[in-house]
């Protein structure tokens, strides 16, 4: 029975993948800006993938996202972003979606956004955001006109250090040794994407930590 389930699951996954005719991805520290068939614009963050079917786009504006992207959607029929956590539906608007292993967040910058999580719908107005982490849903507001990563900076508010370090790994090809510290501590602040030493100091100084770079490994310790 288990073998049959695996075969069926694999077949479903293959079918889902084959429904996409286009797949665009970015690597560590890489971002891309691209236009969809309706001239909607997508800014794709580091280590992210979008998939969509260009041949049926005029009938169904739908894509799959793994990672993070900022969308500027042209006016038209419903535009849907699908993630492993839930889906986002809009008509014409600007919004950011983050769908990472450590959490899910949607921020509306213009227009309105419908976010569907566990079959429940949440409507976001401009400057509103919703996040989903470890079965916890929370709402917040932003004063920015676009996500900070567009300007090569990652910004956090009361986020676990573990999640911050996972985000850090998207922009710097390094690993962290954290056995000597408490990685569940909360961090509020930001780090830049183009200066390793500056970025490390931005995280470690507020938390009273020290760091040592050993090749592609960064060892974090208490002061």
Image: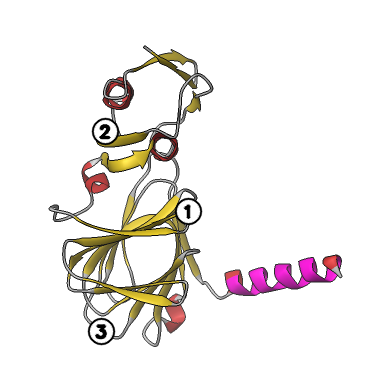
Residue drawn at x 25%, y 64% as measured from the top left: 95
Dominant secondary structure (helix, strand or loop) of the stretch shown in magenta: helix
Q: Earlier in the sequence, mark 3 or mark 1?
A: 3
Position of residue 92 measured from the top left corner of the image (x, y, whole percent): 22, 76
Q: Nearer the viewer, mark 1 or mark 2?
A: 1
Q: Name the foreground residue: 194 vs 39.
A: 194
Between the residue at mark 3 and the residue at mark 1, the CA separation in whole angstroms equals 34 Å
Q: Is residue 97 visible?
A: no
Q: Secondary structure at mark 2?
A: strand
Between the residue at mark 1 and the residue at mark 2, the CA separation in whole angstroms equals 27 Å
Q: Is residue 130 above or below residue 124?
A: above
Q: Is residue 80 above or below residue 60?
A: above
Label 2 sits on residue: 192
Mark 1 is surrounded, within 10 Å at the Cα level, by few (under 14), some (14 to 19) or many (20 or more) other residues, namely: few
Residue drawn at x 42%, y 40% as measured from the top left: 163
Mark 3 is surrounded, within 10 Å at the Cα level, by few (under 14), some (14 to 19) or many (20 or more) other residues, namely: few
Disc ID at residue 134: 1
Label 3 sits on residue: 76
Q: Secondary structure at mark 3?
A: loop
The magenta span reads 3-16
Residue drawn at x 43%, y 16% as measured from the top left: 221
Indicate the quadrant containing the N terminus: top left, top right, bottom left or bottom right: bottom right
The mark tally for this picture is 3
Q: Earlier in the sequence, mark 3 or mark 2?
A: 3
Q: Nearer the viewer, mark 3 or mark 2?
A: 2
């Amino acid at each position: 029975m288990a073998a049959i389930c695996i075969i069926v699951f694999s077949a479903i996954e293959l079918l889902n993948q084959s429904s996409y005719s286009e797949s665009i991805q970015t690597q560590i520290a890489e971002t891309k800006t691209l236009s969809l068939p309706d001239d909607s614009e997508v800014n794709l963050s580091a280590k992210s993938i979008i998939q969509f079917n260009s041949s049926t786009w005029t009938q169904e504006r739908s894509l799959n996202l793994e990672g993070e992207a900022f969308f500027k959607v042209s006016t038209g029929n419903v535009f849907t972003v699908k993630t492993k956590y839930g889906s986002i539906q809009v008509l014409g608007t600007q919004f950011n979606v983050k769908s990472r292993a450590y959490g899910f967040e949607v921020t509306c910058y213009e227009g309105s956004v419908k976010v569907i999580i566990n079959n429940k719908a949440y409507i976001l107005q401009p400057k509103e955001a919703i996040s989903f982490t470890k079965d916890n849903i929370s709402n917040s507001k932003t004063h920015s006109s676009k996500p900070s990563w567009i300007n090569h900076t990652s910004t956090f508010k009361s986020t676990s250090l573990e999640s911050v370090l996972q985000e850090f790994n998207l922009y710097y090809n390094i690993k962290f040794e954290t056995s000597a510290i408490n990685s569940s501590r909360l961090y509020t602040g930001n780090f830049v994407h183009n200066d390793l030493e500056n970025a490390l100091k931005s995280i470690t100084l507020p938390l009273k930590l020290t760091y040592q770079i050993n090749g592609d490994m960064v060892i974090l310790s208490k002061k």
